[in-house]
Amino acid sequence: MKIKVIVTLKKGVLDPQGKAILQTLNGMGYSNIDEIRQGKFFEISVNEDNEAKAKAQVEDMCKKLLANLVIEDYKII
Amino acid sequence: MKIKVIVTLKKGVLDPQGKAILQTLNGMGYSNIDEIRQGKFFEISVNEDNEAKAKAQVEDMCKKLLANLVIEDYKII
């Protein structure tokens, strides 16, 4: 079963990578972009048929490794 | 209007970062994970009220900057 996770920086945490992309887009002529925030995406193949169990395991992995909960949020989609 | 984009490596393209995470998870005792693929996530605030127009613009930005279409796919969500 494939579980997808998005990890994003919490609101208020500086995102220099997003800012760099924004400046580049402005330079390319896209003038109506207010902000870009970059995050990470994971697609995890779990060998488990029960969706609830697989998601619980992925949530555990997010807390322990995939996300830094001090500055990041995760969302299982 | 906020538009979200996921950029992933195409199937068959080597993902060393995903492999490194998989090995770490195995070492932490998660033995039922078959594969992890890592991608990028963007949240883009477009100053445009028309959703179709905003998405069309983001698609254009994906093709020109955010995704490398030789090795990556993008998905506007």
Image: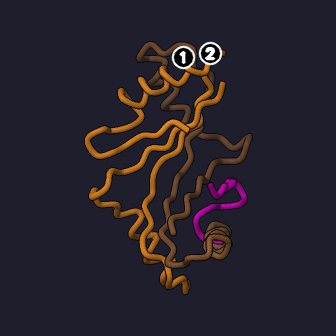
Chain colours: A brown, B orange
Residue under label 1: B53
Nearer to me, A21 or A32: A32
| Quadrant (top left/top right/bottom left/bottom right) for the C terminus of chain A | bottom right
Q: Residue at x 55, y 58 (%)?
A: A4
Query: Taking A22 as reference, is B16 left or right?
Result: left
What range is drawn magenta here? A64-77
Is A12 drawn above or below residue A52 in the view shown? above
- Inspect the image, locate mark 2, and give the three-letter code of the amino acid beneath it: Asn
Q: Which mark is residue B50?
A: 2
Q: Quadrant of residue A66?
A: bottom right
Residue B47 among magenta residues: no
Residue A20 position within the rendered picture, expressed as x and y whole percent measured from the top left: 50, 32
Is B57 drawn above or below residue A12 in the view shown? above
**Dot 2 falls on which chain?**
B
Q: Are marks 2 and 1 in contact (CB under 8 Å)?
A: yes
Q: Quadrant of residue B3?
A: top right
Q: Quadrant of residue B77?
A: top right
Residue B6 position within the rendered picture, expressed as x and y whole percent measured from the top left: 49, 43
Badge 1: residue crowd in 10 Å (few <14, some 14–19, many ≥20): few
Q: Secondary structure at mark 1?
A: helix
